[in-house]
Image (cartoon, helix red, strand yellow):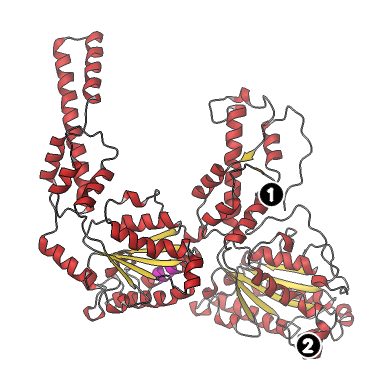
Amino acid sequence: MEPPAPAAAPAEAQPAEAAARALAGLSLGPSPHTPAAPSTPAPPAGPCGNSDNPPGSSTSGDAETTGTAEASPSASSSAVAGNPGAMQALRELVCWPVRFAAEGRALGVRWPRGLLLHGPPGCGKTLMVQAVAAEAGAALHVLTSSRVVGAFTGESERRLREAFAAAQADADAGRVAVVFLDEVDALCPRRDGGRSHDTRLVAQLLTLLDGAATGRPTGLTAPPAAAAASTGSAAGSGGGGGGCSGHLVVVGATNRPNALDPALRRPGRLDREVMVALPDTVQRADILRLHTRGLQLAADADLTAVAAAAHGYSGADLAAAAREAAMAALAEVAAEAYGIGGGGGPAALGSGPLPPLVVRGAHLAAALRKVRPSIVRGAEVDIPPVSWDDVGGLEDVKRRLRQAVEWPLRHADAFERLGLAAPRGVLLHGPPGCSKTTLARAAATASGATLLAMSCAQLFSMYVGEGEAALRDAFKRARMAAPAILFLDEVESVAGKREEGGGGSAGGPDAGLRLLTTLLTEMDGIELAAGVLVLGATNRPGALDPALLRPGRFSTHLYVPPPDEPGRAAALAVHCRRLPLGADVDLGGLAARTEGYTGAELAAVCREAALAALREEMQEQAMAAAAAGETGSGGEADARAAVEVEAAGASGVVAGRHFEAALRAVRPALSAADLAAYAEWGRR
């Protein structure tokens, strides 16, 4: 819940008071998707708009939290942006059995009693449950593993029973009761682990869920008064609904649905499963507006553009980005007003009122660079912006890569209108050192897509199944962060021909086959995730399994050859941009003399030439210092030597002779036969 607006401060406000006033409208709490509104209006009377309130139901708009639950902040459905499908599913579970009780009874509808919300962390699962419970005036009972799991045998099961008994008492009293199992994977893990404590806890939870599905958790006894007040309520609501009787529902939330015991997910327990996805561009813009509604935004602070650039950000990530932008603006204002961070001492503090806090576009851009999407942390490649101009030559390859990567993202409407499907996979193949990785980075920068990169050689592990799990996780992250480029370097190490075996001893003799099977399966499934492109790179295309090269997987093959003469001239110009070149350096002549050099070897030539110039410069400085030492001593001689050394260093440039030495030191590694073999495979 946001702090209330501070009272008006005097003109000579202290820095802390002024900063608090400037940030009063910014949500700094841990709300995962959107901040709670400063004051939530009361919902319509009754659960989700039902004018007939159940006895004892709350109409304040706040979900009551009882039993073993922690106090929940007030939430409003109007303060939740994104995932309308999940919100609708929650309303159907919590509100409809009471709102449409008569209709359900007439149709013989057996209302569902359980729902599982699953999705990445920070997408607002908890906030949605709080908002719908507040909307329905329901009693919300939040159960977490930290509050349920006890140190002694039977203690955890007892706490579970007590929590469900408290919820059932609310339902027997005519209220809507919601049992929220937050991080339910910790309460109901798979029982195949063999831990007796987990087995008992899961069995108890399943028993309670079975009882909730029939209107009375097994083994729980309602107080006599409550039972008399709700005669027929439990049985009626367990079937077709029972007027405005009490209603008990169970909602689970997890970001690891596969870690749950399968028995929890069968019909009759958590009947429905709803994916709470990452917000799309429009939803991200709405979330940013909510998190910055109390801030003054400059004209160049375009939240729509920021939302378009925030691929893969969850609501919590956007909240953190808004906070970072506000803190950056505050740091600038504090530095200007009080000298904080700019050399000002304690005396400068409180010397005047804080100037207006204005968040500019630069603050938001810096915040996005600082706060990266949590879904791809650890897998995303942090690279400096790389443009197509940074890749010398290879114009045809760059043109075709633009068509495969940029066009489907920038011209999605045209692709849809013409019925064109974006390629799912692009294979870059060619000799080592021909800028395949640089091309992938340039494609990611130009398209604005998130780049996730992994070396396939790192997937081999001594543990069976670990490499396949890492590969599946990489594809999962890419799908969630779409539009994204998943760059698989050295792809031949996991996609070798099956008849040749592979995998070595790491992970067993069939490790390579298992990884290949996983890769083929994931690439087939990628058709369900628009905006994800798999970009593979290899210098051994003949070693790839043919199944990987068929249309629908790596359907686009781009041969990346060593640059031709114009390409070599362009590459040399790129690598020499920051070098002080002498007047006798002819890059065109160097390009003509470097036939067969790859892009990496041309970069090595430029680097070696710069090192030769540096060595020569250091020798000149040493000779100048030695000459100055022979002609005199003392302070005057030392000063004269320093001047001569500085003059010798200032005149150093990379001259033609340095490039001649570099060409003698760096020789092309590829023979004519090697280049012919690569070109032959590229022509297939």
In the foreground, 645 or 58:
645
Q: Which mark is residue 240?
A: 2
Query: For this view, does 657 lie left or right of residue 406?
Result: left
**Do we see residue 163 in this rendering?**
no
Examine the structure image and report whether residue 472 is included in the region drawn in magenta: yes
Horizontal and vertical percent position of residue 501: 24, 78
Q: Quadrant of residue 378?
A: bottom left
Q: Find the magenta span and give its range.
A: 469-475
Magenta stretch, overall SS: helix
On screen, residue 657 above or below 229: above
Asked which quadrant contains residue 499, the reply is bottom left
Amino acid type shown at disc 2 = Gly
Please state which of the two labelled residues, at mark 1 or mark 2, is closer to the viewer. Answer: 1
Disc number for residue 65: none
Looking at the rendered structure, the secondary structure element under dot 1 is: loop
Residue 99 in the figure: left or right of residue 435: right
Q: Dot 2, crowdedness within 10 Å: few (<14), some or many (≥20)?
A: many
Q: Position of residue 220 (x, y in %)?
A: 75, 80
Identity of the residue drawn at 78% across and 54% down: 39
> Residue 601: where, in percent of width, then height?
19, 50
Q: Is residue 326 magenta?
A: no
Q: Which residue is labeled 1 in the image?
A: 293
